[in-house]
Structures are given as structure tokens and as C-alpha cells.
Image (spheres, helix red, strand yellow):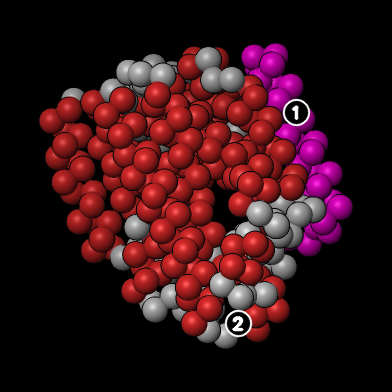
Amino acid sequence: MRRLPRVSELRAAGILEPVLAASYAECKRLNSQHGKTYYLATLLLPAAKRPYVHALYGFARYADEIVDDLSSTLTEEEKAAALKGWGAQAISDIRGGTSIDPIGRALVDTVKKYSIPIEYFEAFLHSMEMDLTVNEYRTYEDLMEYVYGSAAVIGLQMVPILGALSPEAFEAAKKLGIAFQLANFIRDIGEDLERGRIYIPIDDLARFGVTREDLFARQLTPPIVEAIKFQIERVRNLQREASVGIAMLEPASRPCIEAASELYCGIVDEVEDIGYDIFNFRAKTSTWRRIKVALPAYLRAIRAR
């Protein structure tokens, strides 16, 4: 584990015990290294809330690395065994209220502090296991089984930390999490094909006359463009439906979620800007756009505090 950095976030959150603080610091390192947009949005939260968000990210990132690390020498069976073993221990630790795992310590502490339901973490691990065995989804409803665990529960886990002013905040958070995931699916169509996966529902593709073979041919055609446009509209509809939920959070948390919504769902704007050619280009959120979104959000965050 890396040396504990001297950061005000841990002091602000009252996390002073050295071993526990080191666990939170490791989660923050994972967030800053691998989740740059997510990390940027997290910085807009009050310092006392940030370590707990880092802990949730650390848990999700570690599980995702087991599943998706392309440089790994593990076979699919070995990955499945590693994920199952690590996940079972994480759930056991949450139930027991203690952990010796470098990531698990911070996660267990966060779950206890905010009374986050263990079912959310079980659903997440179920979706990670699906990634090892399921390569495509026939319908949107089929896909939602996976997306609920891989994305919707992330939003649900966050709400207790962000502070809900109304129970309706949970449904909005779930929709926003789904929108984030669907935007990633659109951006990553080409990369997911390298893993042999298709996250765009097969029935949605068929609606526009697109087959699996068409996708694997990696040739941008008018039907594929129309299929992508259909998915983009779904993301924007979910984002609109979720936007009302931001006002149901504590004022100091709103700038973070506003920025995250614009940056994550804004991925589809970048897909449009590359002419929908997800086979030859990777849509990226530019530094300028991050600044354009983050600076006003930062000023709002300061006022809210």
C-alpha cells in the first residue's frame, strides 16, 4: 500500500486511525488514476464526503479490473474464481463489519457509516460475474439486469453520502447511473467488440437492420449510425428524467452531480462530434470541456458550502 498522503479530506471526515486512513488513501489513488472524470466531479463535494465516495470507487474498480484487465494472464475460469472469492470475502466483511483487505477496510467503514444496503454490492458483483459469461443481450430488458448491478446501484450507493432530501432522489440516481452506463456502451462499441462483447441490445440493432456481423465488420454504415442515434436519444431521455432528482440532494452535493451528469452523458456529444465512427476513433471529453463544466460547478460548490 502506498504511503498515506497528508490530505485534509481524511481529517475533515474524521478518519484518523492510520490503517483505515491508508485504506481510504488507496481508494483515492485508484479513483484519481483510473476515474479521471469521476475524480474531477468528486472534488466538487465537501472534503468530508470525498473519502467515502473514493471507497465506493475503489471497490468497483478492483472488481472491474479482475474482469476486464486485457493484459492479465488469467483464463476466464481463473478470473471467475478470483472474482467470486474476492467478492464473497467483501460481502462477508460487510456483514461482519470489519475487513483486513486494503480496499475492504474503507468500504466496510463507509457502508457502516451510511447504512448502505448490502444488496447493492451483491447486485454489483452479480453483474461483474455476468461479464465473464454473457457476451450479448437480446432485449433492453435483458440488458437492464446487467446494468442495474453495474451502474444503477452505484447511484443508489452514492445517495446516502450525498444526502437525500426526498426518497425520490434514489429513483433519479438510479436513472442517472443507467444513463452513464449506456453512454459508455455507445462510446466503447469498438473496444467491447475486441472482448467479444456487444452491449447494444440485439433487438435494437435489428430494428435498424444491423446484425452482429455488421458490427464485427467494423464498417460505419447508415444503419449503424441510426442505431447509435437511437441509443444516444435513450441516454438523453434518462438524463432529463434524472435531472429533477439533483434538487432532491443536499445543496453542497448538487454541483458534483450536475458536473458528473454533463460530463458523463456528454460522452454522446463527443460521439456525434466524431461522426459516430466508434470503430476508428474513441470519443473523449476534452480538457476544455472539463474546465468549462468544472469551473462554474466549483463556484456553485463554494457558494453552497
Is 246 placed left or right of 142 in the picture? left
For the C terminus, the quadrant is: top left
Q: Measured along the vertical axis of the image, is residue 130 above or below residue 118?
A: below
Whether the magenta-drawn stretch holds residue 81 is answered as yes
Q: Residue 209: x and y, percent?
A: 61, 75
Mark 2, Cα crowd under 10 Å, few <14 / some 14-19 / many 20+, is some
Q: Residue at 20% of width from left, 41% of height from top?
A: 298
> Which of 192 and 178 lies nearest the eye of the viewer?
178
Query: Could you say whether the residue bearing mark 1 is in a helix, strand or loop?
Result: helix
Q: Measured along the vertical axis of the image, is residue 145 above or below residue 34?
A: above
Is 241 placed left or right of 189 in the picture? left
Q: Residue at 54% of width from left, 59% of height from top?
A: 185
Is 251 placed left or right of 86 in the picture? left
Amino acid marked by disc 2: Arg
Q: Residue at 65% of width from left, 62% of height from top?
A: 203
In the rendered structure, find residue 218 and report the number of the disc placed on it: 2
Q: Which residues are magenta?
A: 70-98
Residue closest to the far right: 77
Q: Main secondary structure of the magenta part?
A: helix
Q: Is residue 50 visible?
A: yes
Residue under label 1: 89
